[in-house]
Amino acid sequence: MIRRTVITLLAFAMALVAAGTASITTAPVASADVGVAAVTITYSDSQAGEFADEVAQGVAIWNAAVTNVQIVRAAPGARADVRVIADNGWPRATLGPVRPGGSGTVWMGRQAVNQGYSVVRIASHEFGHILGLLDVKPGPCSSLMSGSSAGVSCANPNPNTAERNRVQNNYRSGAIATLPDTGKVVTG
């Protein structure tokens, strides 16, 4: 478990350095199910347009922050649990938790990007909805799910401890079978 965590964090750090975003950090995850395989959900960025790199960074942040669920890019042409779509509206997403074989959508809205909001924060925030988190508004920049209420200057893409723990709980052993699908779209 420790070796896997260290390898994951090293891979994440190398990806951040390569992307020029070495200032992004994550804290250790609490309350993981020890010895339980992570739930894996897939995403497709085939319609993410100019946001594909930032979406991958937002996914990497969640993958480094939690252990009970991992998000992986689906192979081209394969069915994905989550579609990422670039559009001209405000960012929004299906409220999860999305399960394997489920259906969720993240809309990477250009309206917020054009207003100056951080694209990586948007991607990470919208995947927070996919993982079952509601908005916390108004909220401080330290809360990823505060979204736009933290202001344009907030570029924090990292979930805080409470947000990480909530996702860990959403995907704990047995929980995934009991949480209802909402089908609800929330605007980030």
Image: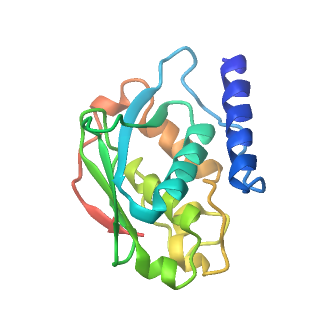
Q: How many marks?
A: 0
Q: Picture coordinates of residue 105 (x, y %)?
A: 30, 55
Query: Residue 115 vs residue 20: left or right?
Result: left
Above/below status of 127 relative to 175: below
The quadrant in which the N terminus is found is: top right
Residue 79 as seen in the image, left or right of residue 155: left
Question: Is residue 140 shown above or below 183?
Answer: below
Locate the C terminus and report the quarter of the image it occupies: bottom left
Q: How far across and how far down the image is residue 76, in percent?
A: 32, 38
Name the residue nearer the viewer: 119 or 101: 119
Residue found farthest to the top: 35
Where residue 133 sits, quadrant-wise, is bottom left
Residue appearing at x 54%, y 69% in the figure: 146
Q: Position of residue 37 (x, y in %)?
A: 47, 19
Residue 172 vertical placement versus 158 (above, below): above
Instruction: Spot the residue most to the bottom.
Output: 115
Residue at point 24%, 39% (across, down): 102
Question: Who's the residue at 52% across and 63% down the image?
Answer: 145
144 vs 78: above or below: below
Residue 71 position in % (x across, y down): 45, 38
- Closer to the camera in the image, 30 or 79: 79
Q: Residue at x 49, y 43 (%)?
A: 167
| Of the pair 166 and 93, the residue shown nearer to us | 93
Question: Is 87 placed left or right of 16 in the picture?
Answer: left
Residue 133 as seen in the image, left or right of residue 163: left
